[in-house]
Image (cartoon, rainbow, N blue to C red):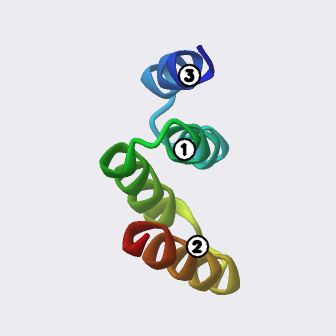
Amino acid sequence: EAASLLNEALKQDSQFAEALYNLALCYEKLGQKAAARKAWEQFLELCNDPAVKEQIAAHVAEFIST
C-alpha cells in the first residue's frame, strides 16, 4: 500500500525526492529489484548532496549484486 501511495504522490510532484527515496526502499523490501533500481536512479538525479549520492550509489550496487 505504501508504494501505491508514494506513486500517487509522485504523480502530483515528480520532483518529490523524499517520495522517491521511500519508494525505492519499499520496492527493495518487496524484492522488486528493477523497480527499486529505477526509483534509486530517479532519486539520484534529484539529489544535490555528493556524499548522499555516493552512499546511495554504493547501496544500489550492493543491492543489485545480491
Residue 17 in percent (x, y) is at 59, 48
User: Which of the marked residues, 2 or 3, is nearer the chain's N terminus?
Assistant: 3
In percent of the image, x 66 and y 77: which residue is there? 49
Residue 46 lies, with reference to residue 2, above or below; the image says below
Q: How many marks?
A: 3
Residue furthest out toward the left: 34
Q: Toward which corner of the image does residue 3 lie, by quadrant?
A: top right
Residue 44 lies, with reference to residue 12, above or below; the image says below
- Which residue occupies the foreground of this view, 30 or 20? 30
Residue 60 in percent (x, y) is at 48, 70
- Which residue occupies the foreground of this view, 23 or 29? 29
- Residue type at mark 1 is Leu
Find numbered disc 1 in the image and state the secondary structure of the residue it sits on: helix
Residue 9 - label: 3
In percent of the image, x 39 and y 61: which residue is there? 41
> Which residue does the numbered mark 1 point to in the structure image?
20
Q: Nearer the viewer, mark 1 or mark 2?
A: 2
- Residue type at mark 3 is Ala
- For the C terminus, the image quarter is bottom left
User: Which of the marked residues, 1 or 2, is nearer the chain's N terminus?
Assistant: 1
23 horizontally vs 18: left or right = left
Find numbered disc 3 in the image and state the secondary structure of the residue it sits on: helix
Mark 1–mark 2 Cα distance, whole angstroms, equals 12 Å
Whether label 2 touches label 3, CB < 8 Å: no
- Residue type at mark 2 is Ile
Residue furthest out toward the front: 66
Residue 56 - label: 2
- Which residue occupies the foreground of this view, 27 or 41? 27
